[in-house]
Amino acid sequence: MPISLEEFARLNQLPLRWILLRRECNVLTGNPQFWYRRDLQDHARKLATEASEILRARSIDQNENLNLWGPDRDRTIA
């Protein structure tokens, strides 16, 4: 069973802005005219890009917190 956007955001500590972007993108892509209107496609692309950047930035933050990019990244954990 898939989880909701809200649950995914909570689990990954994403901001409310991410949820709002995803919802608006879903509304746009759910519009039957989406496939025929370049303006809707462009707007959805902008929203999706911003949401992806938020997700990517959060992923980088989590990796840095795990010290994956630090000087000990190649050391084996016993």
Image (cartoon, helix red, strand yellow):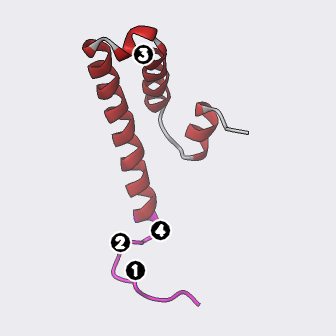
Q: Compute the Cα span from label 4 to label 3.
A: 37 Å
Q: Where is residue 27 in the image (x, y as percent from the top left)?
A: 48, 15
Q: Where is residue 50 in the image (x, y as percent from the top left)?
A: 33, 33
Write down the region rendered in magenta. 64-78
Q: Compute the Cα span from label 4 to label 2.
A: 8 Å
Quadrant, the C terminus: bottom right
User: Residue 9 sits in which quadrant?
Assistant: top right
Find out whether the residues at labels 4 and 3 contact each other: C-beta distance under 8 Å.
no
**Front in this rendered view, residue 45 or 16:** 45
Q: Compute the Cα span from label 2 to label 1.
A: 6 Å
**Front in this rendered view, residue 23 or 78:** 23
SS at badge 1: loop
**Front in this rendered view, residue 64 or 1:** 1
Report which residue position mark 4 lands on: 66
Question: Disc 3 residue type?
Answer: Leu
Q: Position of residue 61 (x, y in %)?
A: 40, 56
Above or below residue 50? Residue 74 is below
Q: Compute the Cα span from label 2 to label 3.
A: 38 Å
Q: Residue at (41%, 72%) from the top-left corner?
A: 68
Q: Which of marks 2 and 3 is in front?
A: 3
**Label 1 Cα neighbours within 10 Å, binned few <14 / some 14-19 / many ≥20:** few
Is residue 67 covered in magenta?
Answer: yes
Q: Residue at (30%, 19%) from the top-left corner?
A: 43
Question: Disc 4 residue type?
Answer: Leu
Report which residue position mark 1 lands on: 73
Question: Disc 2 residue type?
Answer: Trp
Q: Residue furthest right?
A: 1
Mark toward the start of the polypeptide (4 vs 1): 4
Horizontal side of 78 relative to 65 (left or right) equals: right
Report which residue position mark 2 lands on: 69
* Majority SS type along the magenta span: loop
Picture disc at residue 42: none
